[in-house]
Amino acid sequence: MNTTLFQSLPDAVSVYEVSPRDGLQNEAAAVSTYNKTRLVDALAESGLQRIEVTSFVSPRWIPQLSDADDLLKMVHRPPGATYSALCPNRQGLERALATGVEEIAVFLSVSEGHNKRNVNKSVAESLAGFRDVVQPALEHGLRVRAYLSTLWGCPYEGEVDPKRGVAITRQLFDMGCYQVSLGDTIGAGTPLQTKRILEMFLAEFPSERLAMHMHDTRGTALANVIVGLEMGIRTFDASVGGLGGCPYAPGAAGNLATEDLVYTLHAMGIQTGIDLDKLLEAGRVASAIVGRDLPGKVLRAGVRSLRR
Amino acid sequence: MNTTLFQSLPDAVSVYEVSPRDGLQNEAAAVSTYNKTRLVDALAESGLQRIEVTSFVSPRWIPQLSDADDLLKMVHRPPGATYSALCPNRQGLERALATGVEEIAVFLSVSEGHNKRNVNKSVAESLAGFRDVVQPALEHGLRVRAYLSTLWGCPYEGEVDPKRGVAITRQLFDMGCYQVSLGDTIGAGTPLQTKRILEMFLAEFPSERLAMHMHDTRGTALANVIVGLEMGIRTFDASVGGLGGCPYAPGAAGNLATEDLVYTLHAMGIQTGIDLDKLLEAGRVASAIVGRDLPGKVLRAGVRSLRR
């Protein structure tokens, strides 16, 4: 019996909400800017302090998020919260600066195949391009986060060498990114693999500089996050209701559902600053604005089974 | 960083399939005996060696399983496989003996409130009643398993004292049960709780005498199973597709999906003797015979995301 398990759990962790961006960018049906505002405001009302609201990519790439500028003007901005947006290039940064977000994020994949199809660049070209974004953003007082996708596997190349991810991550930190969020983009990750990947990263970088961004395509996201928690990771990305994937592609799935993560963390005595009942209310808003049931399990079952 | 994590993983574990019983007993729509046969045969074809096929409860209690005798005559019985059925009393045992199952199971809850509502007996009355079943079954050469429900929480009493479960388990072993399957009936369990419960049981009993039977109501079943695996548990109950719950009660949920468990175990280098592709075929049979999509995630997404 492993008797050291869960002996160094933290008092609190940070939950990074990505549903307005990573969730809604995959919705086939149009969601109005007003309804996006309802979602972001409900998420903030639950106590979430870090929310990725949208993306300043070209509307030609992701028409679902073409209202990024308007949305960021319409949402309520609670004091102390960090609102973020993806910025693929200098043009995106100019738009982000005009809206007054506190943070931007850059993104690339470990695997050349996915990066090429996702942003039509090699990994080296992506990294070179970030130099037009990260330094200017820092000079304007923004924080810059980075997403590193396909670390647990690539839909085009299969297995990925985590050492490539470590090397890319070092460059992202050298540029000035404050945190790199390690992504299981295809939701293929399993606990032993997660341990091995995180060991490589934690041998090189402080745990607080890393986050986990796990899609739940095969139901393994929470188990992988528990491994990360045990190994010292303290920031976890999640999407309320498990929003994400594509309703026309049955295999696609969103991120780990925020409410399932928060339910689990709270039961383990770990604080998140989030009111779980209000988070479920945000989940119901998410479900209503996309017009379908969402996969998040605590959203369906409720927090309590007790009938007395 | 916890560096001892996953350093003592086993070469193989045993997966105990419960979908024909625990899954189908909760289906509102009638499933024909022929279609149940298709499911059981498909499960066996995947390599599953332990299958709980049905229950010899009174048809008045669970009409969905009133065809238990016929079903056990119709299913293919591959050599080496163990087919089991629930037996609540001596009458059920007589029926079980007539069908030639290799194993029966008795069942009760840790909490008085759930046991009373489930079988209309106190826990002490349940245990006393097992004496009419277990010893005669052993004398006829059957193995006897036991289910201990509501260990992670009771829908009527809330929190449950695991020490009560330890005491009940000792009585079940003293009677001659070879294994007790510890059940999170309401699917409320979380990893730290799982560790604490298992520590109490593993301080008293050898790990091979215990199994875990986790419902996935709040998405935590796999994470809890990984904790159990790390602590030495080597038998896990599961239901293909996550079959179970009630389609008319959105909060209800079945067991951990067998394919999600097997996908994860195989990826961790742990053998199960199961062909995952054939298991997915059994999941498609399960989905077809109940006429709805099932929650199992690998069933929806497939094993591989790779497109090349």
Image: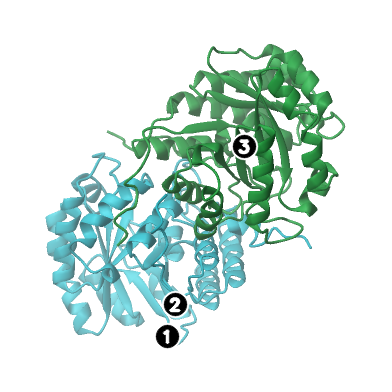
Chain colours: A cyan, B green
Task: List x then y, in percent, for residue B16.
Answer: 55, 32
Task: List x then y, in percent, for residue A308.
Answer: 79, 63
Checking the image for residue A49, the label placed there is: 2
In this rendering, the label closer to the viewer, 3 or 2 = 3
* Quadrant including the C terminus of chain B: top left
For disc 2, the neighbor class at 10 Å (few under 14, some 14 to 19, many from 20) is many
Q: Are marks 1 and 3 on the same chain?
A: no
For disc 1, the neighbor class at 10 Å (few under 14, some 14 to 19, many from 20) is few
Residue furthest to the bottom in view is A79
Inspect the image, locate mark 1, and give the three-letter code of the amino acid beneath it.
Gly
What residue appears at the point 46 percent right and 63 percent down from the top-left corner?
A19
Inspect the image, locate mark 2, and give the three-letter code of the amino acid beneath it.
Gln
* Quadrant including the N terminus of chain B: bottom left
From the viewer's perspective, tell me whether residue B231 is left or right of residue B9. Answer: right
Task: List x then y, in percent, for residue A33.
Answer: 49, 69
Residue B173's quadrant in the figure?
Answer: top right
- Spatial CA span between label 1 and label 3: 44 Å
Q: Say if A245 sits above or below B237 in the image.
A: below
The residue pinned by badge 3 equals B243
What residue appears at the point 71 percent right and 61 percent down from the top-left corner?
B158
In this rendering, the label closer to the viewer, 1 or 3 = 3
Mark yes or no: residue A223 visible.
yes
Residue B97's quadrant in the figure?
Answer: top right
- The residue tagged with tag 3: helix, strand or loop? loop
Residue furthest to the front in view is B174
Checking the image for residue A80, the label placed there is: 1
Mark yes or no: residue A150 visible.
no
